[in-house]
Structure formats: C-alpha cells, structure tokens
Image: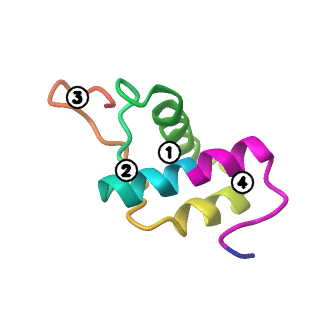
Amino acid sequence: MGCHPAYLSKRTQHRLEMLRAYARKHGHTNVSFQTERPLGLWVLEMRTRYKNAQLSPELFKALSCIPKWTWDIPTSRSGRPQ
C-alpha cells in the first residue's frame, strides 16, 4: 500500500493534496478550522476517527505519509480544538 492509494475517493484525494500543500506552505499540519474551515474540519475529523479507531488503513497510510503529519489534536489555551 503506497502513500497515494488510487482507490480513495476523489474528494479524499483532493483533501490530501490540499493538506500536502498546506504542510509545504506552513511547515505543519495543525490546520485551524477557524481560518481554513473546510480543510481544518476535515483534518480534525480524520484525527478524531483515528482516535476512535474508525479510520481506514488506506487513509491512515496516506495521512501518515504527509510530512509533518501528527495524530495529536492540537488544542488552544482554552482546551478546545483549534
């Protein structure tokens, strides 16, 4: 299983590419859903699925291959997801 599984949906592949571009530009994958709403919410959903053991192995592998990816859900000082 490679880092770019062709059998993921086009929407998922698009989100992965958006995340790769974000990581290249910002040097991290802690996307804020307050400033980058669609991508940030998707990233939060992927991390939540992982935490709840609901993420497919294919998507796990694809996300793990993204430089600077982390499975931790970043929180603000208030303790809420960013």
- Sequence-earlier tag: 4 or 3: 4
- Sequence-earlier tag: 4 or 1: 1
Q: Which residue is mark 1?
A: 47
On residue 79, the disc is: 3
Can residue 54 be seen here? The reply is no
On residue 57, the disc is: none
Marks counted in the figure total: 4
Q: Secondary structure at mark 3?
A: loop
Query: Which residues, given as a range, are shown in magenta?
Result: 3-17
Q: Which residue is mark 4?
A: 56
Q: Amino acid at mark 4?
A: Ser
- Sequence-earlier tag: 1 or 2: 1
Above or below: residue 10 compared with residue 5: above
The image quadrant that residue 81 belongs to is top left
- Sequence-earlier tag: 2 or 4: 4
- Sequence-earlier tag: 3 or 1: 1
Give residue 40's position: percent from left, percent from top: 45, 34
Q: Amino acid at mark 2?
A: Asp
The crowd level at tag 3 (other Cα within 10 Å; few <14, some 14-19, many 20+) is few
Q: Quick one: quadrant of the C terminus?
A: top left
Q: Residue at x 14, y 30 (%)?
A: 77
Q: Secondary structure at mark 1?
A: helix
Q: Residue at x 63, y 63 (%)?
A: 62
Give residue 18's position: percent from left, percent from top: 55, 48
